[in-house]
Amino acid sequence: MTNTRTDRENRELLRLTDATAALDQARSILRDGPPKPGNERLLALAYCMLTFGEMLKQASHGTVAQAYSGPIALRDKLAHVPHRKLNAEVLATSVERAASEILPLIQARIQDLSNGRVSVFV
């Protein structure tokens, strides 16, 4: 018997894949250390984390999963903070935390969706 994903599950899978790509890009930006204020690497890092949080928000289908609440809150702040007030250390810490705590959850959910397993993620 073949399990097929619903449209909602397909959208969730795409958003989680996009979130993973955004986090990977953020990690790449940080390979040379946190960017300096005013450096365009800082803007790129902020954009990656904004995208990461946005994709998790969309993957949550309007119900924020507890595991995603931190990146979504960061996304909400980044969407409204002037670029001159970006804090490279806060962003770097957020990337590290997301990579160690949230990325494994995302990867497990992607695996579940790819294998056709349906579960509620809260």
Image (cartoon, rainbow, N blue to C red):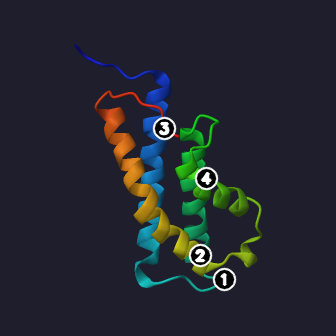
Q: Residue at x 54, y 61 (%)?
A: 48
Quadrant for the N terminus, please. top left
Three-letter code, disc 2: Leu
Marks 3 and 1 in Cβ contact (< 8 Å): no
Q: Secondary structure at mark 1?
A: loop
Give the Cα distance between marks 2 and 1: 7 Å
Q: Residue at x 34, y 19 (%)?
A: 4
Q: Quadrant of residue 102?
A: bottom left
Provide the residue designation for mark 3: 121
Provide the residue designation for mark 1: 38
Q: Position of residue 81 (x, y in %)?
A: 76, 67
First reached walking from the N terminus: tag 3 or tag 2: 2
Label at residue 69: 4
Q: Position of residue 87 (x, y in %)?
A: 66, 78
Provide the residue designation for mark 2: 42
Q: Residue at x 48, y 51 (%)?
A: 19
Residue nearer the viewer, 109 or 44: 109
Tell me: residue 52, above or below residue 55.
Answer: below
Give the Cα distance between marks 4 and 2: 23 Å
Marks 2 and 1 in Cβ contact (< 8 Å): yes
Q: Secondary structure at mark 3?
A: loop
Three-letter code, disc 4: Ser
Give the Cα distance between marks 3 and 2: 32 Å
Give the Cα distance between marks 1 and 4: 28 Å
Three-letter code, disc 3: Phe
Number of other residues with Cα within 10 Å of mark 2, as a class: few under 14, some 14 to 19, many 20 or more: many
First reached walking from the N terminus: tag 4 or tag 3: 4
Q: Secondary structure at mark 4?
A: helix
First reached walking from the N terminus: tag 1 or tag 4: 1
Q: Position of residue 33 (x, y in %)?
A: 46, 84
Q: Mark 3 or 2, which is nearer the eye?
A: 3
